[in-house]
Image (cartoon, rainbow, N blue to C red):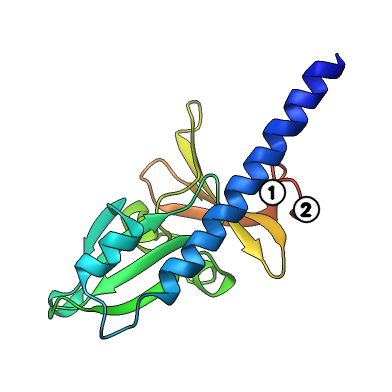
Amino acid sequence: MHIRRTRTGWRLAACALLWLALAGCDAQRISELDEGVATEADVRARFGVPEAIWDAPGGARTLEYNRNPAGYQNYMITIGPDGRMSALRQVLNPANFAKVKPGMSMEELRRMLGKPALQQRFGASGEASWEWRWMDPPNRAMLFIVWFDGDWRVARTGMQEDPQAQPGVAK
């Protein structure tokens, strides 16, 4: 019994260290990229292959970089038609959540917030839900939840504290 608890404790500590390392790595990567200067090649050299690439207005493209489910950020990095980075933003925040409205399509939501940490489908009702893990400053782990109707349109949204927050992160 004691060995099992120790192993679980070590695993939790390792997960916490990995989460902190990822957060630190992202901060370093972001500091190395200047808007209007960094190229798409520079972005890919620091962040790797994007989760998705979205067409943006005026010939720009947005590269999606997820840190969910292990982390609390999703980054959208816009590359202008000139091949240079024009914006880098962390999209999991209350301002973006406020833009999510009933009737919005699943694709619109995905383009706005990136890939969710968890996707669930409820067979009997035909509904589904998506959850994103995010951090309410300074360190309160939260979930933003969106429920879809049977046509994959936003039905409602909600927030709650993340019951599976990393050790050392306030719940």
Which x, y percent locates residue 5? 81, 23
Q: Which residue is drawn at 72% across and 63% down?
A: 139
Amino acid at the residue labelled 2: Lys
Image-based side of 5 in relation to 104, left or right: right
Residue tagged by mark 2?
Answer: 171
Q: How far apart are marks 2 and 1 (CA)?
A: 7 Å
Which x, y percent locates residue 131? 54, 48
Q: In which quarter of the image is the N terminus?
A: top right
As rendered, which of 21 and 63 lies closer to the eye?
21
SS under mark 1? loop
As rendered, which of 46 and 93 lies closer to the eye?
46
Q: Quadrant of residue 46?
A: bottom left
Q: How many numbered discs, if any?
A: 2
Which x, y percent locates residue 149? 45, 45
Check whether the beta carbons of the residues at disc 2 and disc 1 lie within 8 A of each other: yes
Q: Which residue is drawn at 77% across and 32% down?
A: 9
Residue tagged by mark 1?
Answer: 162
Question: Is 31 rendered above or below residue 69?
Answer: below
- Which residue is farthest right? 2
